[in-house]
Image: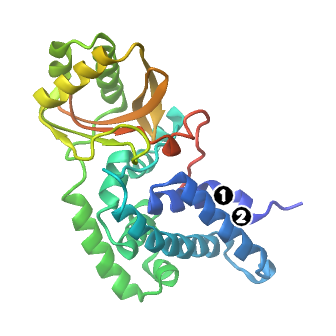
Amino acid sequence: MTEDPFVTHRSLLFTVAYEMLGSAADAEDVLQESWLRWAGVEQADVREPRAYLVRIVTRQALNRLRALSRSREEYVGEWLPEPLLTSPDVAEDVELAESVSIAMLTVLETLGPTERAVFVLREVFELPYGEIGEAVGKTAATVRQIARRAREHVAARRPRVRVSRSEQQAVVERFLAALRTGRLGELLEILAPDVVMITDGGGVVAAAVRPFHGAGVVADLLARAHRRVESLETTAVWLNGAPAGRIDLDGEPSAVSVTVEDGRITRIHVVRNPHKLTRLNEPAELAR
C-alpha cells in the first residue's frame, strides 16, 4: 500500500510552517488545517503532491501569520521563536540548520508575511519562482522582486560570520561552565564587548521586557542570578540545529541559544516562557 504523500512529506511541511511562524505549536495547527484540506481533495488528480502540499501549508501559514501579527505586537516583553530540541544530525545540513536557528528566525520576524514566505520557500527550499507565486498569489516576476528585497533585508541583519559546529560547541560549554560558577571574570572572558541578551518570559514568568547590552551588564546580571537561586543546573543540548543550553533555575527551565563570532558570544536568546518550552524532551523531525 502506497503511503499517503502528506505522511511522506510531513517533516518537510512542518519545517516550512515552523520557519514561517517561528512557533511549533502554530506550525502543528497549520498542519492539521492543511491535512483537512488535503483530505478533501481528489488526490488521484494531483500530479505533484509535494508541491501541492507545500502550497496548501504556505497559504495556511500565511493566514495564521497575519492573524498572529496583532497578538505578537501586544506580547509582554520581547517575543522570541519557540526553541526546538534537535538531533546533531540536523547540523549536517548546514543550510537547514542556519535557516531554523533562533538567530535566523528572529531576523525573519522583521519581514512581512509575504516576504517571509517567499524568502523561506526560495532560499531554504529552493522552489521555482512560479511555484512560489502559486503559493502566495503573486506572479513569478513579482516573486523574484520580493525575493531580492527579502534576501537583502536578511543579509543586512543575519550573523556576519558562520562558525563551525565544534567552535560553537566549545564556546557553549565554556559559557555553561561559567554560569555554574557564577564568576564574573569567567563570564566576561566568554562574552563579546557588545553582547546583547534578550529574554522572553511572555508575561508568564519573570523576564526583562527589554534587551541587555554590553558584556559588563550581561555578565553582572548572570552572576547575580547565580547568587539569587538555591539551585542552578545546566545541560548542553542541541536546539534548532546548533549547540545550546538548557538552564534550570530552582527547577524552572530556560532554553538558551547563543550566536558566536571570533570565539565569543555576541548574542544570547533566553526563552523562559513555559508555553514555549514544551518541545525540549524529544527531537523535532525537520527536513527540506
List x then y, in percent, for residue 185: 15, 14
How far, Cα to Cα, is label 1 from label 2? Answer: 6 Å
Examine the image and state in which quarter residue 112 appears. Answer: bottom left
Q: Is residue 287 above or below residue 2?
A: above
Looking at the picture, tell me which residue is in the foreground, 159 or 188: 188
Is 278 left, or right, of 169 in this rendering?
right
Q: Secondary structure at mark 2?
A: helix
Q: Amino acid at mark 1?
A: Arg
Q: In the image, what residue occupies the spot 45% across and 67% down?
A: 68
Q: Amino acid at mark 2?
A: Phe
Q: In the image, what residue occupies the spot 81% across and 60% down?
A: 3
Circle 2 residues within 10 Å: few <14, some 14–19, many ≥20: some
List x then y, in percent, for residue 280: 55, 35
Q: Is residue 109 above or below residue 205?
A: below
- Residues at marks 1 and 2 touching, judged by CB atoms closer than 8 Å: yes
Write down the residue under mark 1: 10
Considering the image in quadrants, where does the N terminus appear? bottom right
Is 33 left, or right, of 226 in this rendering?
right
Q: Secondary structure at mark 1?
A: helix
List x then y, in percent, for residue 276: 49, 45
Examine the image and state in which quarter residue 267 appears. Answer: top left
Tell me the number on the disc at residue 6: 2
Q: In the image, what residue occupies the spot 84% across and 62% down?
A: 2
The image's colouring method is: rainbow
Is 229 left, or right, of 194 in this rendering?
right
Q: In the image, what residue occupies the spot 64% across and 63% down?
A: 31
List x then y, in percent, for residue 197: 24, 38
Tell me the number on the disc at residue 118: none
Circle 1 residues within 10 Å: few <14, some 14–19, many ≥20: some
Q: Is residue 139 above or below residue 221?
A: below
Looking at the picture, tell me which residue is in the foreground, 259 or 280: 280
